[in-house]
Image (spheres, rainbow, N blue to C red):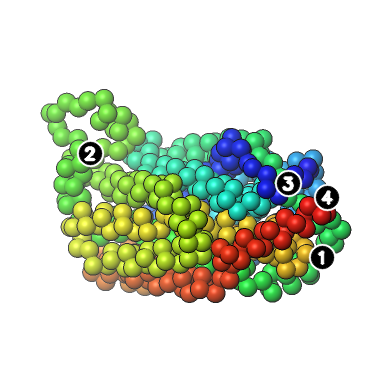
Amino acid sequence: MNTESASQKVSLREKVGYSLGDGAANLVFQMMMMFQLFFYTDVFGIKATAAGFILLFARFFDAFVDPVVGILSDRTNSRWGKYRPWILWTAIPFSVFFILAFTTPDLGERGKILYAGITYTLLMSIYSFNNTPYSSLGGVMTSDIKERTSISSIRFVTATVATFIVQGLTLPLVSKFGNGSDQRGWLITITLFAVVAAILMFVTFFSTKERIVPPKGQKTSVRQDFRDILGNLPWKSMFVLTLFLFTTLAMWGSSMSYYFNYVVDKDALFAFLRKAGLVEMAGQSYGFGHRVLDAFGLIAKEDLSNVFAVGFSLFNMTGQLVTLAGVLLLSQWLAGLFGKRNVFLVCLALTAVSTALFYFAPSDAVGSIFLINLAKSLCYAPTIPLLWAMMGDVADYSEWKNNRRATGFVFAGIVFALKAGLGLGGAICGGIIDLWGFVPNAEQTESAMKGIKLTASFIPAATFMVGVIALAFYPITKRMNERMQAELRRRREEAV
């Protein structure tokens, strides 16, 4: 592995190639965050509490996987580098386990729980072996502050496109491919996404390069790795932030499937879609654009049979378009003006406030529900590229303070926090809606709908605010980061 100047610029081609890996990961991650709980309860037929426990169990099992992946990847030495080969090795298994986790074998209740638990745990484990090295790779492509933020921004543009596809097209494609069979529709849709994900991972492997290496003479010590991160205040702040951030995103993402299916008034939603030109009326002829949308299942039928799928997809797609605009236009610009931490803190606080507003929206006020989502998406958008750019800064901070670099181990802890949050969020959502009386595929009681509304508003708003508090303790300001990078650059030049 060649070492180059710490200020080495990264080509746009390489940045885009790297970003495709996150596009692949988000085809899987967004599916788990938005639809896994809903799939288990409404498609596979597992009780909400049991489904939530499956999500939580996989996270606790993963507690032992993530540090192992970090340790192994930090100690990998190959002609491709430390982290790139893991992306190659895991591409196919990742796709296979993705398909298995959304397959619905004909089993009894206990067999379904066992099958779901095993396949989901396997999927989460291979996610660790793929995504921890992938995230670490972003921290060793360059140490230039602006280049690192640029890499993260392009990465999350691709991630947002993948999110747009998953959140916008999954349910319509399931309806289209299934043709009356949800199980068949889910299997074909997931298989399609899995094949695309594998191809994108291969492109990432072949188009990227590692440039930063550990200091010469660094001794490998797992005990010292643990000591370094436990004494690293920025790492601890980012761990708490990531844990509560992804707990919130998983909880809110899971709850919104139920919110649109059971709380939002379907007649009002159909009227809203008709104004948007996304309905099919008997006896009318339509143009090419309408037929294209219909081919993707994005046209609502008069009998309301797919109004939930089309309405929820439109809700997600409009939110993601605003998010994409926010990432492109605001994130790097705001971070350059005010620093990553300050932008993240303020924008996350505003996201919490806008999320709480969902509780007050009447079920037939579809326009208001969409407007609240657009406001929430715009507030959250600037934070998206900053999390992983800040983690690269945390790895640099550890090297700056301890004269040791363990990028994979630093990122492993954060990936564990991410996946723990994903499991906690799904479990909390499943537990709360079950406690308030949710019954799948049935008309919900007033109590059950209140439980769904709480998991879509006040509860995620509160957990977002915990992330805001964690950011208040994050010490790497813009000025400190510039001083730290200058010192690290000097050390690396002297070591050559």
Q: Is residue 349 left or right of residue 283?
A: right
Residue pointed to by mark 2: 278
Label 4 residue SS = loop
Residue pointed to by mark 3: 5
Going by the numbered disc 2, the residue's amino acid type is Leu
Q: Are marks 3 and 2 in contact (CB under 8 Å)?
A: no
Label 1 residue SS = loop
Going by the numbered disc 1, the residue's amino acid type is Ser
Report the Cα–Cα distance between label 3 and label 1.
27 Å
Quarter of the figure that contains the N terminus = top right
Going by the numbered disc 4, the residue's amino acid type is Val
Quarter of image, res 488: bottom right
Q: Nearer the viewer, mark 4 or mark 1?
A: 4
Q: Is residue 235 above or below residue 211?
A: below
x and y, in percent, of residue 400 in the image: 72, 64
Residue pointed to by mark 1: 221
Which comes sooner in the sequence, label 3 or label 2? 3
Q: Are marks 2 and 1 in contact (CB under 8 Å)?
A: no
Q: Residue at x 39, y 47 (%)?
A: 325
Q: Is residue 312 above or below residue 450?
A: above
Q: Please tell me which residue lies in front, 279 or 400.
A: 400
x and y, in percent, of residue 209 in the image: 69, 41
Going by the numbered disc 3, the residue's amino acid type is Ser
